[in-house]
Amino acid sequence: MIAHVDLGKDSGVVKVRYYWYGDWDEVLVEQDDSTATGSIVAPVAMVGSAEQEPAFGGPLKVPQDGIGPMRLLAVAEISRGRLGTRSIFDEVIVDVETTAALITIDFETDKPLPLGRTGQSSAFGHVDSLGKVFELPVVGDFADGVTRRISTPATGTSYESSSPKVIKVLPGGLLQIVGNGKTTITVTNRGKQGSLDVTVNVNDEPNEPPIADAGEHKSVRAGSRVKLSGLRSRDPEGEALYYSWSQVRGSKVSLLDANNSEASFLAPNVSEPRTYRFKLRVTDKKGADSLPAFVDVTVEP
């Protein structure tokens, strides 16, 4: 594909770095880092400069192991003279498909998979317990010799549990422990199937999973302190909750108090409105997890 850059109101752009990452991945770049390299956990796909044609763009190779929704993040470094540089970003979702046939489906886990140990002390989800939510690491081997991650339904994968009273299939390809016993999880994608036997042996004390609430979407001004509130999250039994905030859209911001009910960050400088998305998961004392809740924060110039 060819990457093009519309500079819009931004002048003084020195270079633009491009990054690919999966729709399920954490963000990769510290926006407030003056070099725009930040804490990168994926290679730079391309560095665009003014001398290129088109300027700051050009041919951009799609990752060979990409499949399903992927985020293309472009981070521009803008010169501020003696004040150094600042970074701005734009981000688009690209649906990546492969023409190679799927050959086999596999699981990057123990086979069969044992979950839980009765009597193990519980502390905020560090053990397998009734209500615990998890994702299977599912991969597909394709005819082009590439192994691709296909855990999410967005990649064409569906799940079925032979015993829903042991493992229940939740939206988004997540699985939840709901009882003791044995079950077989069958994964289907592109006409192929893979199966994984699972044995669950956890403390069977009844426990309803908590419900996460990340608050209302909001718009804020650049430079303001933004508070994310999970105070409306609740546990049916009224137990204390463990909170876990993470960022899933936008160039990375420094998120404070990510393990508290209220997290915060400083809204970065932007030239045009930009949306940052955050995910909240809550866990009760017995280890039951909520489904993720999301909140969008649009930062205005």
Image (spheres, grey):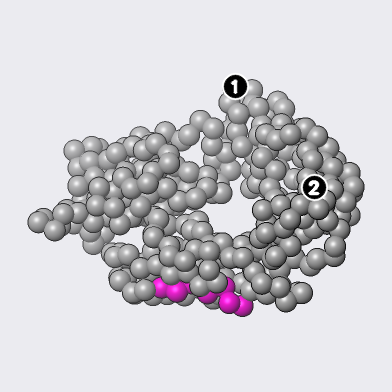
**The N terminus: image quadrant:** top left
* Mark 1 or 2, closer to the camera: 2
Q: In the drawing, does residue 139 fall left or right of residue 271?
A: right
Residue 164 in sight here: no
Q: Circle 1 sits on which residue? A: 145
Dot 1 lies on which element? loop
- Residue kind at label 1, given as amino acid type: Gly
Q: Please name the residue shown 36% across and 74% down the image.
A: 225
Residue placed farthest to the left in the image? 82
Q: Position of residue 105 (x, y in %)?
A: 72, 31
Q: Please name the residue shown 31% across and 45% down the image.
A: 37
Q: In the drawing, does residue 144 fall left or right of residue 49?
A: right
- Magenta stretch in the rendered image: 226-232
- Residue kind at label 2, given as amino acid type: Arg
Decide: marks 1, 2 in contact (CB < 8 A)? no
Q: Please name the residue shown 35% across and 35% down the image.
A: 59
Residue 143: quarter of image: top right
Instruction: Give whichever of 31, 201 is nearer the camera.
Output: 201
**The C terminus: image quadrant:** bottom left
Q: Position of residue 265 (x, y in %)?
A: 40, 67
Q: Is residue 243 above or below residue 174?
A: below
Tally of numbered tags: 2
Instruction: Give whichever of 224, 6 is nearer the camera.
Output: 224
Q: Position of residue 260 (x, y in %)?
A: 53, 68
Dot 2 lies on which element? loop
Along the polypeptide, which appears first: circle 1 or circle 2? 2
Q: Circle 2 sits on which residue? A: 117
Residue 223: quarter of image: bottom left
